[in-house]
Image (cartoon, rainbow, N blue to C red):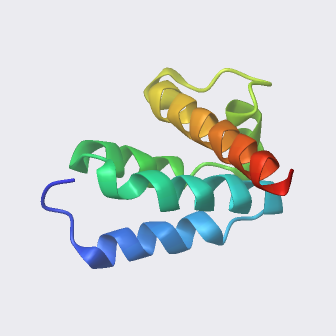
Amino acid sequence: MSGTDDATLRRLRMRSIRRGIKEMDLILSAYADRRLDALSADDLALYEALLFENDQDLYRWVSGQEAAPPRFSKIVLDIAETAEKAAREARFRAS
């Protein structure tokens, strides 16, 4: 992440947490916590654009029920993989 200020990251984290449906709150807040600091400026801009999409569409894309638009396919895959890894780690900690 080059040239991205803390205010931008805080704004994106807040928008990741306060979604329209709880499932996306959980998925996107986990992604923001784990990945935002490592994203390039271009990827952060793409992530911000993704946050303007409808939550029901986002959930279908991330869960694999529908293919994401080509513009978002790479970042949606990253979000889905991050969510799966977080879920595995949570199950491991619970056992």
Residue 20 in the image, given as x and y percentages of width and height: 75, 64
Q: Quadrant of residue 71?
A: top left
Give whichever of 16, 83 is nearer the camera: 83
Residue sitting at 68 percent across and 35 percent down?
Answer: 62
Q: Does 91 sit above or below residue 75?
A: below
Q: In this view, does 74 lie above or below 41?
A: above
Q: Is residue 32 visible?
A: yes
**How far from the left and from the top, in percent, is residue 84?**
69, 37
Residue at the (61%, 26%) spot, across then down: 68
Give residue 10's quadrant in the image. bottom left
Q: Note whether 83 is above or below 1 in the view shown.
A: above
Residue 69: quadrant of the picture: top right
**Which residue is farthest front?**
95
Give the residue displayed 66% in from the left and 72% down from the top.
18
Kindly tell me whether residue 21 is visible in this rendering: no
Q: Is 47 positioned to the left or the right of 18 in the image? A: left
x, y percent for residue 38: 31, 50
